[in-house]
Amino acid sequence: MKGKDLLSIADLAPDDVKRIIDSAVEMKRQGTSSVLAGKTLALLFEKPSLRTRVSFDVAMHQLGGHSLYLSPAEVGLGSRESISDVARTLSRYVNIIAARTFDHVTVQSLAEYATVPVINALSDKEHPCQALGDLLTIHEKKTVLEGLTIAFIGDGNNVASSLLLASALVGVNFKVASPRGYAVPVEVVALGRSLARGGAQITLVEQPQEAAEGADVIYTDVWASMGHEAEAEKRRAAFVGYQVDAALLSQAAADALLMHPLPAHHGEEIATGLIDSSQSAVFDQAENRLHVQKAILAELLG
Ligand code: CP
Ligand code: NVA
């Protein structure tokens, strides 16, 4: 995939996903190398971040390269300067751009004008790096992917969409339980079904228990994503009954993993204390963002 962009999981073929996961396993074993010596990554962020920013920065460092963080205030993407001019200018200085944007169209237009690869570091529609890191975590813990079932409980958001698509590509069944009005967009479900391999099923239900029954992974994320803060109160009301708690977790397989991309709102989408359960893979998940992003950077920079 040298020179290509990673804006959506749909930019990847099943073999790309498998290769990135295998490479991440190797990167994790190896620790540091010099494969990206002399290369620079620009981190262009419109929204806050802990994991994505730090893991990309550390990833470049561990691969012998360099990264620089550009805050919204500094760049003024689309206000101080047009998206196309920012993309064309940055391309003259850096070898790759990771952008976190409110609107997915912004990361798409950065990619359109940049002459270097652009990685979607989260937009309102997708979070592909998260989904790839999550598959790495599941693969590590379960040793296989194909035939497993992920139950996603909550908002059909960017994280749910990318994980649905990534699951479809590697033969993982994806069941998602969301309240009415908060389901994964129909076009994402249709795309996932068209990409599905290995008989992977995508199932949309309303009741969390129905999704959780016998699942290998129970996954949740915040009810109000970045950019939706003003809807937090309304969403708290809409998502009553959708909290992942010990009772819901007990409906899944006995050895099911509990996953959350973080940041978490303890006592909302996830019961207080559940993150410390023996089934929680949450901090391994956070760590694996580093390893998978090293694999993504090496893949796109060749
Ligand atoms: N999971 C994740 O992307 O976290 P940050 O928003 O902190 O980067
Ligand atoms: N869905 C969340 C994920 C954060 C990593 C958000 O977009 O805010």
Image: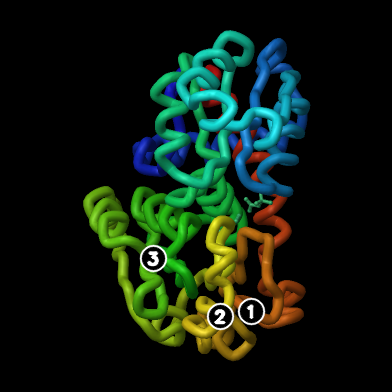
**In the rendered image, the vertical position of residue 191 relative to residue 209, given as above or below:** above
Is ligand 2 within 8 Å of the beta carbon of the residue shown at mark 1?
A: no
Q: Can you give x and y, in whole percent of width and height, for residue 271 in the image?
A: 67, 82
Q: Amino acid at mark 1?
A: Glu
Mark 1 lies on a secondary structure that is loop
Q: Amino acid at mark 3?
A: Phe
Q: Can the viewer see residue 221?
A: no
Q: Can you give x and y, in whole percent of width and height, for residue 285 in the image?
A: 65, 55
Name the residue rendered at 69%, 47% in the picture.
49
Q: In the shown orientation, is residue 253 left or right of residue 283?
A: left
C-alpha span from label 2 to label 1: 8 Å
Which residue is label 1 attached to? 268
Q: Earlier in the sequence, mark 1 or mark 3?
A: 3
Query: Which marked residue is nearer to the observer: mark 1 or mark 3?
Result: 1
Q: Earlier in the sequence, mark 2 or mark 1?
A: 2
Q: Circles 1 and 3: CB distance less than 8 Å?
A: no
Mark 1 residue crowding within 10 angstroms, few (<14) / some (14–19) / many (20+): some
Q: Circles 2 and 1: CB distance less than 8 Å?
A: yes
Which residue is label 2 attached to? 236
Q: In the shown orientation, is residue 42 left or right of residue 236?
A: right
